[in-house]
Image (tube, coloured by chain):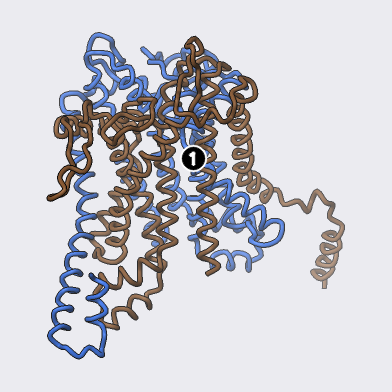
Amino acid sequence: MTAVAGRAAGGPGDSKPSLKGKAARGSILADKAATVVLWGTGVLVLAILGGIIVHFAMAAWGVVSLNFVFGDPSDTELGGVFPVLWNSIYMLGLTMLIAVPVGILGGIYMAEYARETGILGKLTTTIRFAEEAISSVPSIVVGLFGLILFVDNFKWGFTALSGALALTFFNLPLMTRLAEQALRAVPQDERSASLALGATKWQTIRHVVLPLAIPGLITGVILTAGRVFGEAAVLLFTSGIGTPAHYNFMNFDLTSPASPWSPLRPATTLSVYIWKLNSEGLGAFKNQIVDGSAAILISMVLMFNLGARLLGRILSRRLTAA
Amino acid sequence: MAQMTTAYQSSGLRAKRSLMDRIDTPQIVVLAAAASMIFIVALLLAFIAWQGIQLFVKDGVPVTQIFSPTWQPDMTSPNVSFGLLPFIAGTVYVTAVALLISTPVSVGLALFLSEVAPQWARSIVQPALEIFVGIPSVVWGWLGITILVPFLSSTFGSDINLGLPVVGTVITIPGFLTGFSWLAGSLVLSIMIVPTITSVSYDAFRAIPQELRTGSLALGTTRWQTIRHVLIPSALTGVLTAVVLGMTRAAGEALAVQMVIGNSPSMPAAISQPVTTLTSQITLDMGNTVFGEPWQDALWTMSLVLLIISITSVVLVRLINKRRMGA
């Protein structure tokens, strides 16, 4: 229909002006309709996101309070989620401790050293393939890999360390790619100028490229952090699904499974807790607790996103002004 | 003069540098970091493949049995059968419907962002999409349970007759009894994969040279005609890549789907009925089975199937892009 109208309207040899006018009107109408539909998709996304935020704001009303955020879980009343929230933050810290340095170093190789030809070119292709492959492996399969490798073979059991390493595996490609992009965004002139002054390649990377890439690197770290924070499927069978009752934060004995600071203890995170409560379906306050926990997760995601944006903007402004 | 001597001496020294001196330590460190991903993939493939074949090697289940539609993993039952067909079919069907819903919306959104939206609209919609990516899958699942599932069961609770005016009823779909269903899973997934398909298609549309647009518009076409006859054909391989990536994400998603799909381990009957997927069944059963028993080995086989699906899609994306580069 549109195709015919398009040809008729566009054809210069058309002898019937009345038909041409009609066809042109038709294609203009189709164009207007398409514009409305395409705007509609944009409005739809905003409406869904707005709906989700309003829904959780309403669901969390009367549930999320200081007692909920900083309290311990309870069997008889609403209780709180602090131990699992702590575990989410702890797991995030532990994962990023490994993923950030390795990811940035890998990004440096991919942006500064990787060759596209020869034997090293083959290596680059293989690394990229591995990067894409890990990104596409389902998170539950990465979790199972963690289960067989860390929990069973290394005999670490369901611990924060098993979970954090599985999460690192899962997010390393993302961190590496974001670091590579941040480094590639640094103008080539900066490198040439530094090399012309007699600096070695590594001195150039260390003192010129890395400082200039900091805004992009920080954005990358925060985006990766956002994904680590909400991930649950990787952790179900690696860091355990028990409910911690109470943590004694004065217990700094890192070998004690009771210490909240120890990596060798089970660590149920907020996302895993939501899944567990839902699948067990027990408890009078189940729905309120899940609504409240989901509201906390959503607010954290919003904070991560806005934080990444804001920090990136401030840092790049400061760097370009200096 | 003195300086020249020093230069001579130092160049002489440089020639005599041992092999150890010439090794660029920073380069080796960064290379090791990047190459660690190859190591991880190799390890993951080896472990999952090894665990995945135990069902056939150790438990002696014939390979053909996994194509049976009967799932009866309980060893105490008289007719034990490890048919994985219900899970594979469930994954394929749920993913297919999710793609059918999500692709038009996402490609439309990509076109909106790249061709139609003014700067201010783009600067609102793009961050919104990034927040979509960040919403954890358990939260999507919970939204499905609290909003979508009750809606489906209360609105379409009784049998639905789809018909034509003259012919009458063509097909009857049984009503959504509980709301936990194939469609609920597909709808939740379709929202979750919008950012993936949108961002990759958006890049494909942005990569089209501006001349193609101006050339087409100069011939007197409207913007929609340009989109339909010039932009969509030129970006087709990119859009295809986007759909494959969306498919991979949908097929591998575990928790959100498991929460709304009803988890009935039989062949999918209707879009309004509970089904199950590979990921859901692994999520549900892994914690309730003992390591080494055939039931759990079957779950490992399912994860091997998932791994094969995802690696195939990576290769597929590479092939699509290679053809684009070649053309």
Q: Quadrant of residue A88?
A: top left
Residue A206: where, in percent of width, then height? Answer: 58, 53
Residue toward you, B24 or B11: B24
Query: Vertically, is B111 above or below B86?
Result: below
Disc 1 element: helix
- Chain A rendered in what hue? blue
Residue A293 vs B214, above or below: the answer is above
| Mark 1 crowdedness (10 Å alpha carbons): few <14, some 14-19, many ≥20 | many
Residue A157: % across, % down:
54, 18
- Is residue A252 visible in the rendered image? The answer is no
Which quadrant, please, contains the N terminus of chain B?
Answer: bottom right
* Residue type highlighted by circle 1: Asn
Q: Is residue B233 above or below residue B263?
A: below
| Residue at (29% x, 79% y) in the render | B217
Q: Quadrant of residue B300?
A: top right
Chain letter for brown, please. B
Q: Nearer the viewer, residue A101 or B188?
A: B188
The number of discs equals: 1
Q: Position of residue A301 (x, y in %)?
A: 32, 39
Label 1: chain?
A
Q: Residue at 52% across / 20% down in the picture?
A: B296
What residue does disc 1 label? A171
Residue B201 in view, yes or no: yes
Q: Report the front residue among A64 and B5.
A: A64
Question: In this view, which residue lies farthest toward the front?
Answer: B167
Residue B87's quadrant in the figure? top left
Q: Position of residue A1 (x, y in %)?
A: 23, 70
